[in-house]
Image: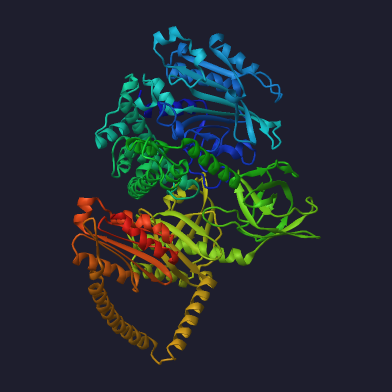
Amino acid sequence: MKSQDVRKQFLDFFASQGHLIVPSAPIVLKDDPTLMFNNSGMAQFKEYFLGNATPKSNRIADTQKCLRVSGKHNDLEDVGFDTYHHTMFEMLGNWSFGDYFKKEAINWAWQLLTEVYKIPKENLYVSVFEGNAEENVPFDQEAWDIWKELIDEDRIILGNKKDNFWEMGDQGPCGPCSEIHVDLRTAEEKAAVSGKSLVNNDHPQVVEIWNNVFMEFNRKADGSLEKLPAKHVDTGMGFERLCMALQGVTSNYDTDVFTPLIKKVEQITGAKYTTNDVILSASEESQNKTNIAIRVIVDHVRAVAFAIADGQLPSNTGAGYVIRRILRRAIRYGFTFLDIKEPFVNQLVAVLANQMGEFFPEIKLQETFVTNVIREEEASFLRTLDQGLQLLDKVIADTKKALPSEGLGRISGAKAFELYDTFGFPKDLTALILKEKGMSFNEAEFDASMQAQKARSRAASEVSTEDWSVLIPGNVETFVGYDQTENEAKITRIRKVDSKKDGVLYQIVLDNTPFYPEGGGQVGDKGTLVSANETIEIIDTKKENNLILHFTKQLPENIEASFVAKVNTELRTLTSRNHSATHLMHQALRSILGTHVEQKGSLVNSSYLRFDFSHFAKMTETELQQVEDFVNARIQEQLPLIERRNIPFAQAVEEGAMALFGEKYGDHVRAIKFGESMELCGGIHVKNTAEIWHFKIVSEGAVAAGIRRIEAITSDAVKAFYATQENTLNEVKVALKNPQDILKAVHSMQEENSKFKKEIENLVKEKIEGLKNILVTEFQEINGVNFLSKQVNLSMSATKDLAMAIGSATPSSFVFLASIEDDLPNIHCFISKELVSQKGLNAGNVIRELGKFIDGNGGGQPFFASGKGKNVSGIKEVLEKAIDFVK
């Protein structure tokens, strides 16, 4: 059975049982501060489990793109080494929100697996929760009784809290679960060892495929459990593992989910992948490493490609860093074990888009963009790897010098960790290179450095969140901020949050709030809560699980009082102008550059706007001016805001509204229209474009491959910008002694400077020629090398020219010159090419070695290199030590 059919049969089955089929949410979570990525099927439904929102149906089914690479659920280091863990995977799931419970969930699971998919019953085992006295949670007798009507009791296993009690996190909804495991071993293996004994023991052919979670508790901050007001069902079935069971193979990677990608890797690299049916001996270690590398690559490209398609670009922070790390792991395995030194992962995107584009259209529509981003990331990291290899060569050389001649050398584990942390070198790559040179590294030191870094990271991000104290029960919170900036409100719930980053803060939820929560690129509102006796400052507003959270540094004395919630209208007004200008600029970019332009990120606050968009080239000055003119023309037209708050999504898109990839939209959306600009947006906007006053681009540059970034200002910021320009112009006037024609005066000064520059260049050339004639007489002959080491009174560039001139004029020369410019030392080394080839001398190594005496670094080619430092007093020692290279 093909994987596409497996997915379809699952959804069709649950549709026939009255479930609403919904699309997968984006793999990247943008409005959930507790998660970077969707790591389970239930993540997009958290607000329903918590009772903060009402689902559109009490029965839902879907397949969800999931990513597990950090935090509690982290499978990254297992990927590639076994045949059933993945970073990105699909989770098939069915959900009940206060509707059916254990009986229906278990019976439907069994019916689907055994009657629809026709998995032999004798290959299946199930588990139920054995209970936990400490938690006061009893044995799940109900689940046991349901299962024993469907399966032999000797195939029912009691599971402990670790295996059979599922929790969303340290706090929140949780409950006992019932897992279904499949035994894919041969008949001979089953006869020899019971599959029951292998369940939950990491056997590659006895694996969990489906977990039915029965949500009936809430985990509180103190660790205690309380009953939820309603019982829910949350199930998740691993799509890839299910395909393995249905396609008669013993590895996820041997299913058609992965085989097209594997074939493409084989075609690109010339390597050969062996299926799981081929048993390799210990002597075939190289083939095992090849298999692992290919599994890593085909798994990781899925995670990276879908994350980018959903709007997450690789970067050095947050979710972007995770994506970059996954991609670099794939590149490293190709580099080390498949001997691929050029970008290649990007070539797999076309295969992935063709394979999964029908069900996940985002990967097909974003194929070119995703390919370009991955290609550029690969090229950049391969350059970084090259830098790391040079550093490792230096560490090896330094270590060998410091060690006695006998025995193997061992480099510092801290240095090996620096290679990992800075250049992405894994332990195995460093170990492999060192082994080839008869060396190793201190693994204990490496592990200690790794643990210290993890401890720092955990400490920096540590957050303690108390339980909600509910003052007004029920789902009563309402946002009124589109129409009001001030209104009467009551507090419905509060909680305390303590973090290393922000200290102690309080989160307040109001029954009616005018405060806009951070989202869609727009920052959250600030303002105050005012009662009869006090004023509490709201320092930020965010949204979590459908609740609007108002952040304060203190709680009101009387939390049950009536308050007036007041938004800071000055900040709100400036922010709304920038937000509306962003929409107009988006329209301008698509009009001027082409419809390939798509929003890839934005930031809108009271000071400026930032907009990331897809485009293949740096914008010209003419294009930037055209964009400015386009937006300002829309401002001059005084276009009124046309806002539609509850329009069906399909209708909005049909009418031309822009929907962004990676955003989660409901069935009904809010559409914002200014003239011909129409976008789906939940943010705050001006009532008329005239309020923006003026629009000015202040910068344009690259963010990533195919991604440009514009920063711009409007309104008061433009006034301040032009005021600054005018002040600068006046200062220039005074400096030029108030000429009548400033431009003419500047041009005249430039011409004078050009003449002076040429005269200085001629004088420097004469000085260099004079010094050359003097210094060529000062060479010393040492071991067949004409050696010169000298400090000169020239600029850095002139010293470089002098070293080249002296060296080129003298055969078999080794020239080392130093000088000081702007109170900073610089050094230069020229080595004749015959010495490079005959004696193995290398100017780059000379500069890197001697640069440490001036607290500097540098590099270059074997015949010429330069460096710059900070310690002028080190020049004397550098000049003295240069001779050591020719002795």
Direction from residue 90 to residue 554 in the image, left or right: right
Direction from residue 747 to residue 541 in the image, left or right: right
Q: Quadrant of residue 275?
A: top left
Model colouring: rainbow
Direction from residue 543 to residue 381 in the image, left or right: left
Q: In this view, which residue lies farthest toward the bottom?
A: 740
Which residue sits at x=70%, y=47%?
496
Which residue sits at x=50%, y=73%?
718
In the rendered image, the quadrant that contains the N terminus is top left
In the rendered image, the quadrant that contains the C terminus is bottom left
Q: Quadrant of residue 585?
A: bottom left
Q: Is residue 764 visible?
A: yes
Q: Considering only vertical position in the picture, is 844 above or below 493? A: below
Q: Quadrant of residue 333?
A: top left
Which residue sits at x=31%, y=58%?
883
Query: Is residue 885 or residue 459 the one in the foreground?
Result: 885
Residue 786, percent across and down? Answer: 23, 61
Direction from residue 860 to residue 876 in the image, left or right: right
Q: Considering only vertical position in the picture, is 279 above or below 35? A: above
* Numbered disc total: 0
Query: Is residue 98 or residue 351 the one in the foreground?
Result: 351
Query: Is residue 226 or residue 419 the one in the foreground?
Result: 419
Query: Is residue 726 or residue 416 the one in the foreground?
Result: 416
Residue 660, percent across and down? Answer: 44, 50
Q: In this view, which residue lies farthest toward the top?
A: 191
